[in-house]
Image (cartoon, helix red, strand yellow):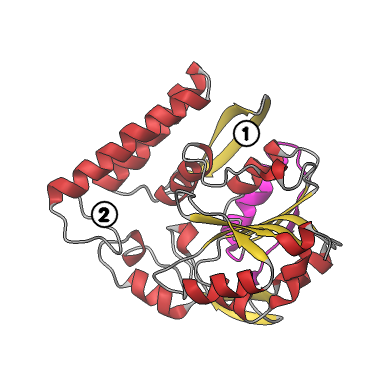
Amino acid sequence: MFKYLRRDGDPKMSLYQVAKRQFSEWSEEKKQAKEQVSKEEFKTLAFWLKKYHMGMFFQPLISRETAKIKLTLHNRPLVLEFRQNQSDLYILRENFIQNIYDFDYESIVPNVKSVVDLGANIGLTSLYFQNRFPNAKVVCVEPVSHNVEMIKKNASNNNFSWGVETAAIQSSVGSVTLYPNEWWSSSTVNKDIADKRQSNEGRVEYNHKLPPEEVEAIPVDVVFDRHNMDIVDILKMDIEGAEEPAILDNPKWFQRVRILIVEIHDKYVDRKKITKALLDAGFEGIVGRKGPTNVFINRRLENGK
């Protein structure tokens, strides 16, 4: 009980403090959800929020059985399918309650035509972008095969036609060892990161790791080439520590991206080096954003240089 309330990087906190934090987040998320969806949709979201937070307090949900919910966003219907586990509910919260990928993209690209989702997980972020930009071409890249099955279900449920690559992003073509686990969204190709997570008794990965497997490795620019994308309007990157080699070791793709929205995993990578590489290439970082994602605008591409 209460085993999973503590987080990496927490200062010294009492059990009361971490429990209070979890309750506060639950309360805030219910408030956010209520403001964004209809009354009936809120009831459904509130049910799954309760499942998630009770799982964190007591016994995490670890199931591959799926559920579906329907939401109306941007005046368009959307069907979300997810596994009934902590990881998928965590991602659901991030994308459709906390809105971690929200940004005024239209002020930079008035007509978004292309989105590439690196570290697509089960496709919920791609659903967010496709719903918001219905005319955009969407490509998903995800190394975990069970997640890829879910991506395809989410595309099919909504009659979306997505390009899908079962691969991990690296700086060169080849293969790489993936370290998956049933907190699916934290599966990584970085052994040091996997070891740290799986050796921590306060993380779900400790008891629910899966056997390592070899997966295809591809660079960012190869993804673009395979899908005939000269310029990508929005590149989303959440690749569990692989952002460092993808950015520092293979800058060829920089001038093919207008907007980069990336989660930089500070515990495992050098944020300063990553940021410097992007700024030196003509990207401008957007300051003042809350949450885990960072937005970089390619001013050189914007200005036609």
Question: What distance separates the C-alpha of mark 1 from that of mark 2?
Answer: 30 Å
Pick the residue in front: 56 or 31.
31
Residue drawn 68% across the image and 37% down it: 132
Q: Is residue 141 above or below residue 36?
A: below
Q: Nearer the viewer, residue 78 or 253?
A: 253
Secondary element type, mark 2: loop
Disc 1 is placed on an element classified as strand
Front one among 197 and 99: 99
Q: Which residue is mark 1?
A: 79
Residue 297 image offset from top left, x and y in percent:
66, 57
Location of residue 196 in the rendering, given as x and y in whole percent from the top left corner = 35, 74
- Which span of residues is magenta-colored? 143-168
Task: Assess whether residue 153 is covered by the magenta stretch.
Answer: yes
The answer to whether residue 169 of the structure is visible from this angle is no
**Residue at 24% in and 56% down:** 6
Left or right placement of residue 179 versus residue 257 in this view? left
Circle 2: residue type: Tyr
In the shown orientation, is residue 84 left or right of residue 77? left
- Residue 163, compared with residue 248, is above or below; it is above
- Please give the residue where the numbered disc 2 appears in the rendered image: 4
Say few, some or many: other residues with alpha carbon within 10 Å of mark 2 (under 14 / 14 to 19 / 20 or more): some
- Give percent across and percent down for residue 10: 25, 60
Of the 4 image quadrants, the one containing the C terminus is: bottom right
- Kindly tell me whether residue 216 is visible in this rendering: yes
Residue lying at the far top in this picture: please name it: 39
Residue 243 on the magenta segment: no
